[in-house]
Image: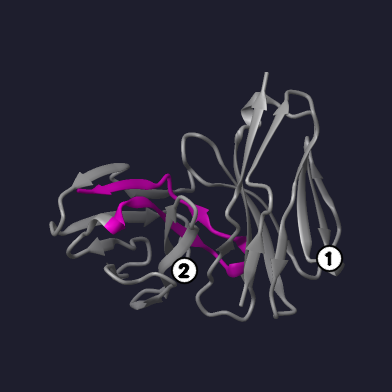
């Protein structure tokens, strides 16, 4: 089944403790992206990647890092999480811009 | 800059009613793509439809239909004979062709509640 898999689905952590949210897709898509969803602010792009080793900032990259060492994986790294990063995070992949993104199931992160 | 406006924050209907979700977009690009996504209470984002800027044909898929009007920069979504399972947040989104970040610009979403 074609899908984008994120883990974990839920995570509660403390301020400053480094964490990684994994994302993997099995569709051989070149384009991958991370979004966060917040009440009243909607969905905003954090980082994107056009191919292996090619990544760039989206609209809200502060406090996040990404890497794309393999085509299928695009982890999101929070080096020192803060409470304002409490959010619902989505990883997404796409074959091409016109096809839209396939989204993962989301990761609900709470930073206390 | 791209912008998507979904003026209806919440809509509540009774089952079997027809309902239209409005979407108005802004872009300076002549080539772009429009999308609708559904977010049910379980939280995932489900792709419903895409439309490119050169294709103004309306589309129907079962109880769902979409009306794309370039002249008014609108891409409205109608659910006919709504059902309780249609209850969800619906997002309209825009992606320009020339951008390098393949970003979807989302509207704020419309919460649709279908009551039995």
User: Viewer-proximal residue, B21 or B60?
Assistant: B21
The residue where tag 1 is placed is B72
Report whether A38 appears left or right of B89.
left
Classify residue B14 as left or right of residue B10: right
Given residues A98 and A111, the one toward you in this image is A111
Question: Residue at label 2?
Answer: A30
Instruction: Look at the image and tell me in which quarter the N terminus of chain B lies.
Output: bottom right
Dot 2: element: loop
Q: Is residue B5 magenta?
A: no
Q: Which residues are magenta?
A: A84-112
Measured as percent of width and height from the top left, residue A16 is found at: 13, 59
Measuring 57% from the left and 79% from the top, which residue is drawn there? B99
Residue at 81 percent across and 58 percent down: it is: B68
Q: Chain of mark 2?
A: A
Q: Is residue A94 magenta?
A: yes
- Contact between marks 2 and 1 (CB within 8 A): the answer is no
Crowding near pointer 1: few (<14 within 10 Å), some, many (20+)? Answer: few
Residue B73 in sight: yes
């Amino acid at each position: 089944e074609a899908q984008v898999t994120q883990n974990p689905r839920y995570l509660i952590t403390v301020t400053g403790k480094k964490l990684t949210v994994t994302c993997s897709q099995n569709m051989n898509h070149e384009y991958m992206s991370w979004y966060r969803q917040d009440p009243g602010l909607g969905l905003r792009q954090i980082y994107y990647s056009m191919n292996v080793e090619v990544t760039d900032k989206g609209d809200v990259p502060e406090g996040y890092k990404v890497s794309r060492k393999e085509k299928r994986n695009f982890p999101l790294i929070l080096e020192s999480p803060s409470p304002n990063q409490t959010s619902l995070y989505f990883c997404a992949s796409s074959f091409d811009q016109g096809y839209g993104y396939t989204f993962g199931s989301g990761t609900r992160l709470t930073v206390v | 800059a791209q912008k998507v406006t979904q003026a209806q924050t919440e809509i509540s209907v009774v089952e079997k009613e027809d309902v239209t979700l409005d979407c108005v977009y802004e872009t300076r690009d002549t080539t772009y793509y429009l999308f609708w996504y559904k977010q049910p209470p379980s939280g995932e984002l489900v792709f419903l439809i895409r439309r490119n800027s050169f294709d103004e044909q309306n589309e129907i898929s079962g109880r769902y239909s979409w009306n794309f009007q370039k002249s008014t920069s609108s891409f409205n979504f109608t659910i006919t004979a709504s059902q309780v399972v249609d209850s969800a947040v619906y997002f309209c989104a825009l992606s320009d062709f020339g951008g390098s970040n393949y970003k979807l610009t989302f509207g704020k979403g419309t919460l649709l509640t279908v009551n039995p």
